[in-house]
Image (cartoon, rainbow, N blue to C red):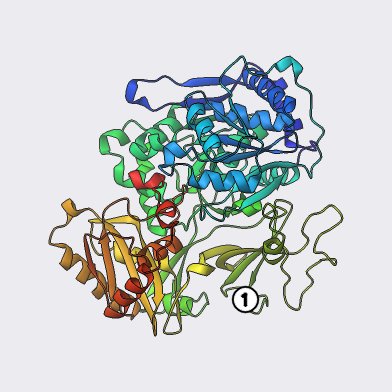
Amino acid sequence: MTNFRTFTELVLERSEARKDADAFVFLPDDARGSVPQHLTSAALDQEARRIASWLQDRGAAKRQVLLLYPAGLDFIKAFTACLYAGAVAVPGPLPAEQGQHFARISGILRDAEACAVLTDSANAPAISAWLAAEGFTDVACLATDDPAQGDAGAWHAPSLTPESLAFLQYTSGSTSDPKGVVVSHGNLLANEAAIQRSIGTSADSVCGGWLPFYHDMGLIGHILHPMYLGAQGVLMAPFTFLKRPYRWLKMIGDYGMTTGGGPNFAYDLCVRRVTDAQLETLDLSSWTTACNGAEPVRAETVRAFNERFAPAGFRPEAMFPCYGMAETTLLVTGIPRGAAARVLDVDAEALERGELADPRGDFATRSLVSSGIARDFEIRVVDPETRVEKPGGHIGEIWLKGDSVAAGYWKRPATNKEIFDAEISGGTGGQDTDGQDTDGQNTGWLRTGDLGALHDGELYVTGRLKELVIISGRNLYPQDVERAVQSTDKALGAGAGAVFAVETDREHLVAIQEVRPAAVATDLHTVASNIQSFIGKEFSIPAGNVLLVRPGTVRKTTSGKIQRTLMRKLFLEGGITALYEVLEPAVQELIAATEAEPEAEAATDAAQTLESVV
C-alpha cells in the first residue's frame, strides 16, 4: 500500500514528480496515417485542473458526473478532472460508437443522478440535444476540449477521505436496470496495490491496451494502474484492435510494453488473424504480463497463442490468467509470477456432479485453466442454496472478502444486503446488526455469482451460477458445450456461440452458433446435423435445437463475454434470424407463445457490441 489516503492525492504527487515525461501515448486508427498523440504528466495535470475548476464552480464536488467520450486522451483528462474536483466520475459508452443511441445511457444518467455530462466538441451537440429531449434541463454539458472553459488557476484541492467515492462502475446489463458499483478511493488504492503485488509492476513498467475506457479492466488496469505506478501508459481504440489485431501486438513491441491484456477472445483473434508476414515484424519479448481475464480462459487458446507467437519472443510464463470483477474494483486472483498458465484436466462426469476428479482412462475429460491465488482477499467456495462452505475440490459459488470489495451498488440497499453482506451458514459473518462496520464498509461476504473450486490453493472458475444448464439432473457448463459445437467445423466462429436451456415440460438445450457461409465445405444442413450428433455423443444429451446465424449475431459485452441470458431472451421472443435452424416442436410452440407478448426493450438490449464487428 501507499501512504496516500486518496487516489487524488497520489495522482497529484505523481504529476509533480514526472512533469515532462509522457503519462500516456494514444495511437489513433492508422487508416489515415495518424500519428501517435502524447500527453505529458504536466499537461494532464494542467488540463485536469482547468476542467476541475469548471466542475467545482458548478457544485459538482461529491456529485456524479457522466463521461461520454470516444477512445482518446480527452477521456483521461476528464476522469482525472473528476478526481481533482472531488466529483464522482461515471464512465459510460459513447452511444454513437455502440449503435445503441441513448437508451442505455439514459438509464445510467437517471440512476446515477448525474449533475453534468463531460464530452468532446464533436459529440457535444448530439448529447446536448439528447439531454433536452429527455428533459434533463438541469444537467450541464461541457465539451472539455474547449480551452476557454474553466481556469486552472481557480482550482482548489478537494476535501476527501478514503471512504469518499472515486467513481461508479456500471456493469453490463439491461437498459432498464443499470447497476453502478460504488468504488471508493480506499477500494481503488487497495486494488491497485493488489495488482502491483500480483504482477510485479513498477515505475519502469509500460502498461496499456485497447479495452474500452469505461470497462473495469480498461479503466483500472490500463489507465489508472500506470497513473498509480507513475509509469507510462500506451493505448489504442477498441475498434483499431478489432479490425486489425496485429496493431495491438505491434504496439507492444514498438513501445516496449510490459503489462496489458484482454479477454480470452482477444488472444484467439490474434491467433486467427495475424498473418505469417505480420508475425515476422513482431517483437513481444518485453511483454512480461499478458493478462487474460474477464471471461473463461480456454486452455486451447493459451496453447495456440504460446505456440503461434513464440517466434516473436512471447514466453509461456508471460501469459497471466486472472480473475476479477467490477464489484471487487478489479483483480482478485492471478497465477504466481513467473509460472506458466496451469491447466488441470478433470473427469467430465465428476465435473457435472460438482467435483474436480482425475481423468479416468478413455472417459471424457475437461480442461480447466487456473485463475491463480488470492493474495489480498479471503476466498471461500460456498453452496449457493444452503450457504455451507464446500471443501477443496468441490464446486460452489465463489465468495470474497477484502479491502477492494466495493460497498455495494449505487442506491440498492436490498440488493446489497443479499449480494455484498452474505453470511456463511455455521460460520461467522463478522457482521453487526446492520451488516456494516463503523466505517460504513460491508463486513459480510460478497457473492460473486461465479462458480468455481479451490484446488491446491488455486482457484478454478467453472462458470456463472445463473447460466448453468441443468438437464436430466446433470450440471453442464455452457462454455464446454459451445467449444464442442465450434470444434465440429472450421466454418464455425470460435467464441461466437451461445448455449442455454429453455423449459416446457422438460429442459431443452439450445445452441446458437455463428457460421461463415463461404467457409462451409458442405451445406448448413450437414453442419447442423454434425453438431447434433457430436453433442449427443460428447455429452449424452439430445441437441434438438440448433441455430446457425450470421457473424455478429451472438451478443457480447464490451469485454467479450457471451450474453447468454440476453440471447435466451431474444430467442424466446423470436428475435434471432437464422441462416439455418432445426427446432423441436415443443420449443417452436414456446417461442410462439412468448412472441405474443413482446417486450419493448428487446431491440434495445440487442444492440451490437464491439465484438460484433469482427
Q: Is residue 276 above or below residue 548?
A: above
Q: Is residue 429 above or below residue 292?
A: below
Q: Is residue 535 left or right of residue 104?
A: left
Count of numbered badges drawn on the protein? 1
Amino acid under disc 1? Asp
Q: Is residue 332 left or right of residue 299?
A: right
Label 1 crowd bin: few (<14), some (14–19), many (20+), radius 10 Å: some
Q: Position of residue 458 (x, y in %)?
A: 59, 62
**In terms of secondary structure, where does tag 1 sit?**
loop
Can you name the residue that lies furthest to the left here?
522
Can you name the residue that lies furthest to the right here?
438
State the residue at coordinates (27%, 79%). Answer: 585
**Quadrant showing the C terminus:** top left
Q: Position of residue 421 (x, y in %)?
A: 73, 64
State the residue at coordinates (73%, 70%). Answer: 423
Q: Which residue is mark 1?
A: 383
